[in-house]
Amino acid sequence: MLLRVLTYNIHKAIGTDRRFAPERIVAILRRYDPDIALLQEVDHGAPRSNSIDLAAHLARELNYDHHVVGLNVTLKRGRYGNATLSRYPIGRQHNVDLTIGRYKPRGAQHTRITIPGGRQTIAVDVFNVHLGLLAQLRRRQVELLLAAKGVEHLAPDTACIVAGDMNDWRGLLRRQFQPAGFACATDHRPGSNWSIKTFPSAAPTGGLDKVFYRGPIRLIRAHRSRLKLAQVASDHLPVIAEFEITDPQHH
């Protein structure tokens, strides 16, 4: 079973030209047609994005039958957070609070996505994350995530993907994920200390958007968008990772 996952900080669909233009995000997602789209900085009821439910709008425009939103930040008017769009049913969803003290609220949206396969469905646990700007906060947030029952209680042979805007310039987070059995799909090459560069979108110098995975799942390839439209649609570039998921009955 092939699975295409895209992670993208869409910056509220406000581009580097400061225009709110969700149609650009729609065009980019349509081009890559992911089975699962993990989006960060998705507005709900905020004036800067015409007070719309942005996740619902994108899901509707792109014909995703399943979507959920984990709203982490409350504005004077409206909220924003992470949104997961899926071609496959979302069996359950839970927002893991990764907020540290008085720092900006952060979260990881946990969804269990059920994919038809053979005589039974294949469950993939997916965590859509947006981590803090300070290194010590990110380390603590990953500790909280890995200790959360959603991750800690997963069997090692459960397909699991953790992806999103990790704000990790130096690639230090892999040191925390590796002991928990995760490989990094977005390393520039196997064993590299450098990640696929995604920020800033016009001329990327940092690999802030990462994908980690473990369990009966094999990476086929990962790459960033090279569309000219993506250079202006957000301040981040989307990353696309393609996997092969093992059917449990053959495992």
Image (spheres, grey):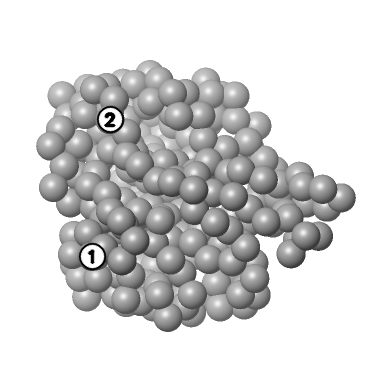
- Residue 3 shown left or right of residue 89 in the figure: left
The residue that appears at 27% across and 22% down in the rendered structure is 229
Q: Where in the figure is residue 160, as x and y percent of width and height?
A: 56, 62
In the depicted view, which residue is nearer to us: 227 or 192?
192
Asked if residue 127 shows in the view, the reply is no
Image position of 58 with respect to 69: above or below: above
**Of callouts 2 and 1, which one flags the residue occurring earlier in the amino acid sequence?**
1
Place of residue 113 in the rendered image (x, y in percent of width and height, measured from the top left): 65, 50
Q: Quadrant of the C terminus?
A: bottom right
Instruction: Say which amino acid is labelled 2.
Output: Arg
Residue at (47% x, 78% y) in the render: 180
Q: Nearer the viewer, residue 134 or 104?
A: 134
Q: Is residue 202 left or right of residue 139?
A: left
- Dot 2 lies on which element? loop
Element at label 1: loop
Label 2 to label 1: alpha-carbon separation: 22 Å
Can residue 128 be seen in the rendering of this structure?
Answer: yes
Residue at 71%, 46% in the rendered image: 115
Q: Is the residue marked by circle 2 packed among few (<14), some (14-19), or many (20+) residues within 10 Å?
A: few
Query: What residue did someone put label 2 on?
Result: 226
Q: Is residue 184 left or right of residue 63?
A: left
Residue in front for this viewpoint, 45 or 250: 250
- Residue at image mark 1: 193
Kindly identify the amino acid type of the residue bearing the numbered disc 1: Asn
Residue at image location 32% in from the left, 39% down from the top: 224
- How far from the left and from the top, in percent, is residue 52? 43, 28
Discs 2, 1 touching: Cβ within 8 Å: no
State which quadrant residue 195 falls in.
bottom left
